[in-house]
Amino acid sequence: MAPPVAVAPGALATTSDRRGNADAIRHLVADRMRMVAASVDHFTLLAVGRDDPPDKIRSAYFDVARQLHPDRITASGLDDIRADAQRLFAQINAAFAVLSNPRKRQEYLQILAAGGEAAVRKQQEQAEATALRLLGAEEHFRTGEMALRRNHYDVAVREFAEAVRLNPDEGEHHALLAWATWCAAADKKAVAREVRMGLELAMKTTPKNPAAYLYLGRIARSDGHDEEAVRWFRRVLEVAPRHTEAEAELRVLESRLGRGDDDGKSGPDGKDGKKGGLFSRFRR
């Protein structure tokens, strides 16, 4: 029988050390990848405190980076975790790039104070979604305006309704929807309540927008309630001086009423003894 081959003590130590180092790297990768999956902040990923000085952050980074270097992974025979190690290496580098730069570190701390990166991303996504929604509302509103000019009232109602759905905080959208609804209706009385509510909401939402007052004046004039119409057109000019449409309407009405711009103090019911129009309940 051949004598046993002698093994140098140092060789056993080297093999044991390599195995132990591989186990340590494997544990490091698994532990930190769980952190990445949990979206921890850069400080947690590097295992440093938010008040730690730059040299401690640098030391913590290099301790991890040395273990994750591609050459170390190859030398340790850890091909099965190479992909995770590379992803983690990229995350560690990104964290260090931020925390080692004083300006970027301060900005990052402000992000964390605002709720963390996930919260900031969510805010940005919400802002983008809001911007897209408002742009969509504007597109529908412009399409509705074009349809209204062409007397395509059903199309206008549909487009304005979508604009209101996408941006209910814009009073002009409510005003144009109400006006288009009134124009489209064969039976004006049947839609009176709906139109009234829409114009009320328009005035409440944006009281300085003249659209609702203009349409109230036109509806009153259409109903034959000229005094009431005059009051609403003058209200238009209060919020929008030199509004050409309101000025034109007033010239016609005041000529019809046989007066210039005199007292203008009659209420929506007027002085002519007529009862208030369909929307005479709107009083300043």
Image: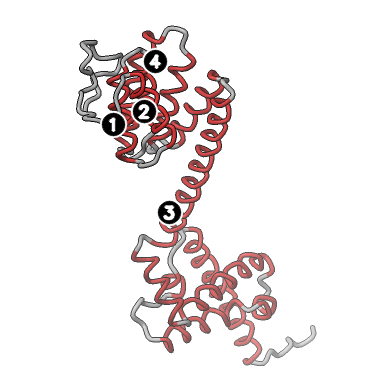
**Which residue, given by chain and number where applicable, does mark 4 sit on?**
222
Is there CB contact under 8 Å for labels 4 and 3?
no
Q: Nearer the viewer, residue 208 or 39?
A: 208
Disc ID at residue 250 = 2
Where is residue 86? Give x, y as percent.
63, 70
Tell me if 3 is positioned left or right of 49 in this view: right
- Amino acid type at mark 2: Leu
Is there CB contact under 8 Å for labels 4 and 1?
no
Q: What element carries label 2?
A: helix
- Give the crowd class for mark 1: few <14, some 14-19, many >=20 residues within 10 Å: few
Q: Earlier in the sequence, mark 3 or mark 2?
A: 3
- Residue 142 figure quarter: top right
- Residue 211 figure quarter: top left
Is there CB contact under 8 Å for labels 2 and 1?
yes
- Amino acid type at mark 3: Gln
**Alpha-carbon distance for marks 3 and 1?**
53 Å
Q: Earlier in the sequence, mark 3 or mark 1?
A: 3
Q: What element carries label 4?
A: helix
- Give the crowd class for mark 2: few <14, some 14-19, many >=20 residues within 10 Å: many
**Alpha-carbon distance for marks 4 and 3?**
48 Å
Q: Which of 171 and 284 is in front in this view?
A: 284
Q: Which of marks 2 and 1 is in front?
A: 1
Is there CB contact under 8 Å for labels 3 and 2?
no
Identified at 50% across, 67% down, the residue is 32
Identified at 51% across, 34% down, the residue is 141
**Which residue, given by chain and number where applicable, does mark 3 sit on?**
123
**Which residue, given by chain and number where applicable, does mark 1 sit on?**
261
**Alpha-carbon distance for marks 4 and 1?**
21 Å
Q: Is residue 141 above or below residue 121?
A: above
Q: What element carries label 3?
A: helix
- Residue 261 figure quarter: top left
